[in-house]
Every structure is written in structure tokens, then in C-alpha cells.
Image (tube, rainbow, N blue to C red):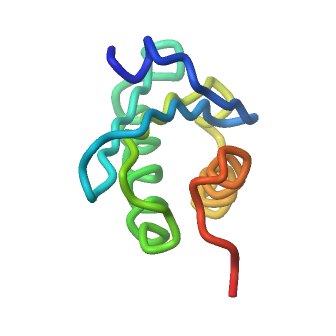
């Protein structure tokens, strides 16, 4: 709720990213997938895709942020690579990801 109330967000086709600066030296990740997206199997699959895509790209993110990813209805048909691309694209828009080497 704290991150939502800060209202600093950016949206894409598959996800909405809410960002708030925290006073820690790590990022905290939140994932929200509503029942509008699909049944529990689909929602859990999307949650796993987001977690894995973030985990594999975590070293590229700047630290000290609370991140909340909210899945949109279109995300139920996306692949891992589309999800990874969406996460990185949203992070680039918010300037919380390091440039590619």
C-alpha cells in the first residue's frame, strides 16, 4: 500500500511497475496478479515468470527501491522472454536499471 500510495508508476503491455525509494541497500519485490488475469494456475505461472525474470536480471537493477509489478490481462499469453523484456523496458523507463555493457 505504501508503494501504491506513492503513485510513481509506469505501464507497459503486460505489466505496470510501481516504484518507491527505500532506505535499505537492497530491492524489495512485490508481485500482484488479480483474478481478472485468469485462474490460479495461470496467475501462479505469471508470478513465477516475473520472479525468475527479475532474479536473472537483478544485478542490473540499482539498489534501494521497493518494486511492485502488477500483471495485466494480456500477460496470461506471454512467454518468458516477453516478460523479461517487459520488466527491463519498464525499469529503463524509470531509470532504475544500469546500462548494458
* Residue 91 position within the rendered picture, expressed as x and y whole percent measured from the top left: 62, 51
Give the quarter of the figure containing the N terminus.
Answer: top left
23 to the left or right of 95: left
Residue under the image location 70 percent in, 55 percent down: 92
20 to the left or right of 37: left
Q: Tell me how many marks there are.
A: 0
29 to the left or right of 76: left
Residue under the image location 49 percent in, 69 percent down: 57
Residue under the image location 75 percent in, 34 percent down: 13
Choose top left, top right, bottom left or bottom right for residue 9.
top right
13 to the left or right of 19: right
Residue under the image location 34 percent in, 44 percent down: 29
* Residue 63 position within the rendered picture, expressed as x and y whole percent measured from the top left: 39, 59
Outermost left residue: 24
- In the foreground, 20 or 50: 20
- In the foreground, 2 or 29: 2
Q: Relative to 70, is 63 above or below?
A: below
Give the quarter of the figure containing the C terminus.
Answer: bottom right
- In the foreground, 76 or 51: 51
- In the foreground, 2 or 84: 2
* Residue 75 position within the rendered picture, expressed as x and y whole percent measured from the top left: 62, 36
Q: Relative to 83, is 56 above or below?
A: below
Outermost bottom residue: 101
Amino acid at each position: 500500500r505504501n508503494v501504491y500510495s506513492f503513485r510513481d508508476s509506469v505501464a507497459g503491455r503486460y505489466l505496470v511497475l510501481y516504484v518507491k525509494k527505500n532506505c535499505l541497500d537492497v530491492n524489495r519485490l512485490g508481485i500482484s496478479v488479480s483474478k481478472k488475469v485468469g485462474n490460479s494456475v495461470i496467475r501462479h505461472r505469471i508470478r513465477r515468470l516475473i520472479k525468475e525474470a527479475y532474479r536473472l536480471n537483478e544485478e542490473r537493477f540499482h539498489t534501494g527501491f521497493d518494486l511492485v509489478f502488477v500483471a495485466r490481462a494480456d500477460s496470461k499469453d506471454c512467454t518468458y522472454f516477453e516478460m523479461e523484456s517487459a520488466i527491463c523496458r519498464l525499469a529503463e523507463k524509470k531509470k532504475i536499471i544500469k546500462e548494458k555493457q
